[in-house]
Amino acid sequence: MTPEYRIEAEKQITSYLQSNDVVNIKYMQVEKTYNDLGVEINVWNVRAEGGNWWVVEGEGAPMNLYTQDAFYFSADEAYSFHMGITQRLQARHHKEFKHIIDELPLDINGVKSISRRLNLAAQSLNEIAGIEHIQSIGLTCRESLIELAAILTEANPTVLTDNNLKAADFKGIVKAVIAIYAQGKSNSNLRKHSRNMAEMAWDYSSEIVHSPNKNIPDAKICLLFTCSIVSIIQNLYLKYLGFDAEQKCPECKSMDYNLHEADDLIFFMLCNDCGHEEAVQVEPQGSE
């Protein structure tokens, strides 16, 4: 155990104990470290106000605490019970595994290589066996974001020169493209939130790549951030093309309506929610 890991673990344990109403910690020390299952698991001996506890944590295992006063008299007992629960949870996870990208409404088929890369990363979440696999997912997300920046640059050829950007500046490129795709005062909050998501995706993928202390939920979050910004950029582009100019009922704002032709350029819009009917004139093709 490195000094850095110990410091971080002590912070996490303290926070975890406080969330379980264990306060005034008087003693905290690693009692025993196990690696018989191929991963390193630490059992901490914690003495606090009101009782003594075993806290079990480590690589690929959720943190949990067990009282020393009743059932778990030794570090071995706490470890055995904890790993039994962990293995059962992992078995259930594998049985009920759901593709991570299925949890997020995405339309990334337009970017085939990014779609393929992110789908493979999502599938690999179910086969993680070590920290290097988690880091590889972070690297995949980072590479996907770099490719996204390249695609945006190709679609907007002047974005680099107009904004004095370099081809490797993901944040700068995405910020500039967001400004193009979501123009106007009415989209100011949307631009801000989109920029924030882009920064989150980029920064967190870098963190996953370089940190030795991340776990499967971290990799999953990283993948969600990356998928989200890809989807956001695509939908901003649809707004830019005018796909958000959908007709709405002027009375109830519903978009559930039927159009009935009355003349060559005149339709009647009948709202299916409130029954309001109104004539809608269509501009002839080729008119300015």
Image (cartoon, rainbow, N blue to C red):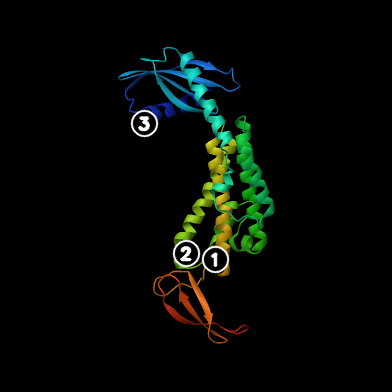
Q: Residues within 10 Å of mark 1 (few under 14, many from 20)?
A: some
Q: Nearer the viewer, residue 5 or 272?
A: 272
> Which amino acid is tagged 1?
Lys
- Please say if 134 is above or below 81: below
Query: Which residue position holds label 1?
Result: 239
Residue depicted at 43% across the width and 29% down the height = 12
Residue most extreme to the bottom: 263
Q: Which mark is residue 19?
A: 3
Q: In which quarter of the image is the C terminus?
A: bottom right
> Which amino acid is tagged 2?
Asn
- Please say if 19 is above or below 265: above
Residue most extreme to the left: 50
Residue depicted at 56% across the width and 39% down the height = 219
Residue depicted at 47% across the width and 28% down the height = 8
Confirm or deny contact between disc 1 and disc 3 (CB under 8 A). Answer: no
What is the spatial separation of the Cα atoms under label 2 and label 3, in whole angstroms?
A: 40 Å
Q: Position of residue 279 (x, y in %)?
A: 47, 83
Q: Nearer the viewer, residue 69 or 10?
A: 69
Find numbered disc 3 in the image and state the secondary structure of the residue it sits on.
helix
Find numbered disc 1 in the image and state the secondary structure of the residue it sits on.
helix
Q: Which of marks 2 and 3 is nearer the N terminus?
A: 3
What is the spatial separation of the Cα atoms under label 1 and label 3, in whole angstroms?
A: 44 Å
